[in-house]
Image (tube, rainbow, N blue to C red):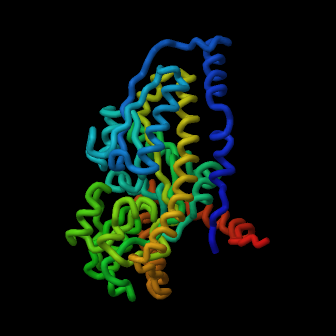
Amino acid sequence: MEKRRKFLKKALLTGAAISIPSIFASCKAKETGGSTNASSQKFNWKMVTAWPPNFPIYGEQLLRFSENIEKASNGRLKIQVYGGGELVPALESFDAVRTGTAQIGHAASYYWAGKSPAAQIFTTIPFGMDANQTYSWLAYGGGMKLWEDLYSKFNLIPFPCGNTYGQMGGWFKKEINSVEDFKGLKMRIPGLGGKVITKLGGSAVLSPGSELYTNLERGVIDALEWVGPYHDYVMGFHKVAKYYYSPGWQEPSGMTEIFINNKAFEELPSDLKEILKLAIRKTDFEISIEMYAKNFEYYLKLRKEGNVIFKEFPRPVIDTLKKVSNEVVKELSSSNPEAKKILDSYLDYNKYISEWTDKIEKNWEFEV
């Protein structure tokens, strides 16, 4: 059953549609006792990301995010956006913001599993909640508080900022007919999904997006999963691997994040804090809804061009992947108290909300 109701749209549309400049002006008026001439102090921030420079959707939307904040603050808060490798390496953005080299970053939390195993839960869990359920858990199931508590240990404040929705299962140079085909397979796959591949005898490789095409072309890796059909097409993976698998068991929801240095955030006056938070909320909506639309558009494009062989993982393979995913989640829970606390909340909410999802979400096709 397709779980594609637009909880995201419902939850975030207000923030996107309301006249944001008027909200910002109101914030300023409150701070200054009715006047919109707030403090003239100016702040220049650096934003580091895990994405290649000018990366479609993410990079583009983050530039708009920066522009919106500068306009809304009358130039009092400016944010210079850097792609991965321009200021710091892509996978060092977390530390760059934590230590104050930059004030704000954008990435996916499963990149930080080496720093905190619990962090990866906020991006996704294999066979776990979809995007709508994940947003619901964060907003109304206690997930956001757990995320904030976890990141506070690193002097960071997290915010959800963009979701890929469900993903494809990845690009492969050879067919996957049984779980035996994972043995010896070198696959770019982060997070808990990577642990599953390792348990099946493969090797999970974590590398930044800028290296993926070359690594796949040269055989450094045999397979990869990235974002979705749109980004996969732009990256050219269809030119070097012909099998495109579904479903994306490893990432039923692909939550990305903004994280802000706590000290830098607290130095902002209250109106700039509100401007920043509202701009993040708008960007969260814009990234997610564009991702949803573009991925299907490029799925159809890949299918029309006819050079890709679309495959579904055989049922026995899916069953084994799910079984091993359960093992991986249990191991994480038993080995890390922070992860256990978050997983208990996540899994309880997953069980709770699934009944409602199954009740209301149908993939109707309206016909006239």
Which of the 4 quarters of the picture holds residue 186?
Answer: bottom left
Name of the residue lying farthest toward the right: 368
Q: Is residue 343 visible?
A: no
Instruction: Residue at 33%, 87% (x, y): give it.
Output: 180
Q: Percent x, y for residue 238? A: 36, 70
Q: Give whichever of 144, 193 is nearer the camera.
A: 193
Side of 140 relative to 75 (left or right): right
Q: Percent x, y for residue 120? A: 42, 57
Q: How many marks?
A: 0
Image quadrant containing the C terminus: bottom right
Q: Percent x, y for residue 90? A: 30, 48
Picture layout, residue 226 above or below residue 286: below
Q: Give whichever of 128, 75 is nearer the camera.
A: 75
Picture layout, residue 153 above or below residue 23: below
Q: Give whichever of 173, 301 is nearer the camera.
A: 301
Q: Give whichever of 200, 24 is nearer the camera.
A: 24
Q: Is residue 72 visible?
A: yes
Picture layout, residue 250 above or below residue 341: below
Side of 208 relative to 229 (left or right): left
Image quadrant containing the N terminus: bottom right
Q: Percent x, y for residue 170? A: 40, 71
Instruction: Residue at 40%, 56% (x, y): give it.
Output: 110
Name of the residue lying farthest toward the front: 305
Instruction: Residue at 48%, 64% (x, y): give it.
Output: 298
Side of 193 relative to 91 (left or right): right
Side of 141 relative to 174 (left or right): right
Instruction: Residue at 76%, 72% (x, y): give it.
Output: 367
Picture layout, residue 241 above or below residue 151: below
